[in-house]
Image: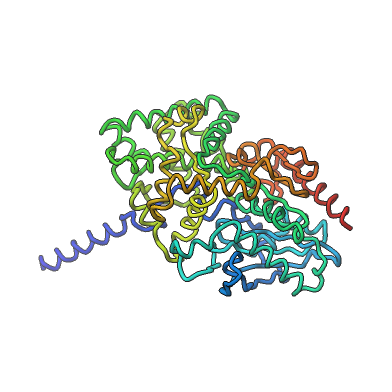
Amino acid sequence: MATKLFVVLLLACLLAEILAAPSTEAKVRRNMIRGRPRGGMKKQPIMTEADAHISETVVSGLFTQTLDHFDNTSTSTFNQRYWHNNQWFKTGGPAFLMLGGEGPESSYWVSNSNLEMTKLAAQQGAWVFDIEHRFYGNTYPTQDMSVTSLKYLSSAQAIEDAAAFIRAMKTQIPELANAQWVTFGGSYSGALAAWAREKHPELIFAAVGSSGPVQAEVDFVEYLEVVKNSISRNSTACADSVSNGFNTVASLLKTADGRKQLKSTFHLCQEININDDKAVKYFWETVYSPYMEIVQYTGDAAGAFATQLTISNAICKYHLNTQTTILQKMKQVNNYFNLENEYFGCNDISYQGFIDFMKDETFGEAQSDRAWVWQTCTEFGYYQSTASPIAGPWFGGVQNLPAQYYIDECTAIYGAQYNSAEVQTAVDYTNKYYGGRDQLNTDRILLPNGDIDPWHALGKLNSTNPNIVPVVINGTAHCADMYGTSTLDSVYLTQARQTIANVLDKWLKQSN
């Protein structure tokens, strides 16, 4: 009897350990990776009950796409997912093409009638399309995500994908044989939309590239500067408290007792190993990440970011509470952020665990992260460092997250050739290939940006070309113009959407 009781107790203990273990991804929050939250930077549209059904006119398909557009001897192809909807189309109308970015696409972008693109489609009588970017979502160009395979992942290949797709649709759909094509996108795909117009003006009539970082940059120091400024414009007292919090963390890291307090505050899965420089920097990513993501999307009509995960409600509400200590304020911000995102476990700060996760070469859990980091290592940089003399001290120290830390991850994940020199060479080439912010001069490009969005710092905000139209939107965040209209929209956002509609209407009418 005693033996049976012992076995039962032992099994119960083992079961309790399994249930309590923070090893499953669903219970372990991963940080924003190079400014990309889980699911991608262009947030999935939120469907209202009225739009929850998928329109009967939405068609999904697989397009036979060329694997390597720059090798005339290559005959390899793959299936690229796409969706289209002709419910707003009128004879002689244009075609609108949403370009997929660094995450999965879906039918929502062509079926939800309250989105910017679909509202414009209704106004212009347009046929709407959405294609998924190679290596993201369920578009698998190769058998795996090894470095050899990832060499087919680039913005240049993606642009040629779009060009091939447009040529095919003009042939396959007689009503579109002479249609004017307009590319749309948000965030990375916003830049892609502008670049596609630039590289293929014979196919693409105009572009609307929302929040597109058209300037590649290795050390993206401006990102955290904008985070600091965006919190400060909400409340200087709140900003002072947040900065006090980051600097308190920096002080506590110096002592064993302080590190114990930090483990509890941020609900860490592991102890902070002060002798492991990479692990400490990865810890800093964990500390910064909720603040970065909240600022990046604050106020967007994209789920919780509309009202809950805003600077006011998710950061300042806690940091302006005079009844709590600075660590309690930071704990409350993290707890609330995790709750809203349904992260119920501890926060993993294992640097090696992250590297191992990112080295997964299957189309598995790490797929989109591995693909996006590859593009930053081989094309864009975009490394959000603390090196700014303006933002660094505010975030607890200019050395907390140097650009070199991110470059070292390129080396650790993809191999020794992906080092500082290669990343700089790649970024320089990207700016030369597309013209960067200053040499982007192709006509009929609209470039909306919200001025509290950290990514707007790499956007084109001014233009001497009257047919390149930046639309800087006061008080809005990342891709805000792309989502459905809301009673919470500011007058500035409403005016910006109208400007976009008016300019596009003028261009399309001039062509007829």
Residue 18 lies left or right of residue 430; in this view the side is: left
What is the tally of numbered marks visible in this picture?
0
Q: Position of residue 6 (x, y in %)?
A: 14, 63
Residue 62 visible? The answer is no
Q: Nearer the viewer, residue 432 or 287?
A: 432
Quadrant of the frame with the C terminus: bottom right
Q: Locate residue 17: give its quadrant.
A: bottom left
Q: Nearer the viewer, residue 510 or 89?
A: 510
Q: Nearer the viewer, residue 235 or 94?
A: 94
Q: Position of residue 444 (x, y in %)?
A: 78, 49
Rendered residue at 64%/58% (across/down): 47
In the rendered view, tell whether residue 127 sits above or below residue 449. Answer: below
Rendered residue at 73%/53% (across/down): 207
Q: Position of residue 391 (x, y in %)?
A: 50, 30
Residue 477 lies left or right of residue 503; in this view the side is: left
Rendered residue at 64%/73% (across/down): 61
Q: Nearer the viewer, residue 213 or 153?
A: 153
